Amino acid sequence: MNLLKQFWKRAFDYKGVISRRDFLLTVAADLLIFMWLNVTALLFAALDSQSGGILLTIGGTFAYLGTAYLILQIFPMIALIIRRLHDHNEKWWLILLGVHPIGFIFLAVILFMGTVTEGNRWRQIDMQKGLLL
């Protein structure tokens, strides 16, 4: 839960770093929230055969919430990926590789690689802010 707070608190922070572990846990938690909203919408829609439409309305509300959540988390997720690239001492523009299928694979490999501590100026920025120990 603490990682999700940090995710939203640093939603537009494109400087600094995030460790591989924190990145993966944050992405997993974000994905679980999105999936929960949409699976709940589908369940309410599937149970609607006897209720006269009220469950379908509730399901539609969850579907709208899932869509709104997906839209709201786009910029925080971009910031998270850029901070992960900084943790590996890469440039921010490598995020653009994600628009091409082969580039997406290359970007995924970079995101799953370990932290580079030696000569990483982005880690120094987070240390000065007190975000890293």
Image (spheres, grey):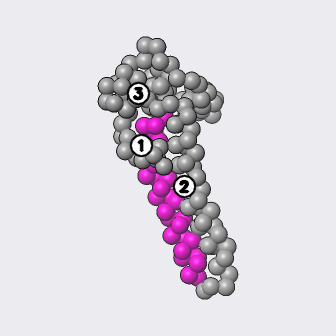
Mark 2 lies on residue: 33
Mark 2 vs mark 1: which is more N-terminal?
Answer: 1
Please say if 30 is above or below 110: below
Regarding mark 1 in the picture, which secondary structure is present there? helix
Q: Residue furthest front?
A: 133
Closer to the eye: label 2 or 1: 1
Image point 40% across, 23% down: which residue? 123
Image point 67% across, 73% down: which residue? 46
The magenta segment = 53-81
Image point 46% across, 52% down: which residue? 71
Residue closer to the observer: 133 or 16: 133
**Seen in the image, is 105 located left or right of residue 77?**
right
Spatial distance from mark 2 to mark 1, Cα to Cα? 16 Å
Q: Residue furthest left?
A: 129
Please say if 67 is above or below 46: above
Closer to the eye: label 1 or 3: 3
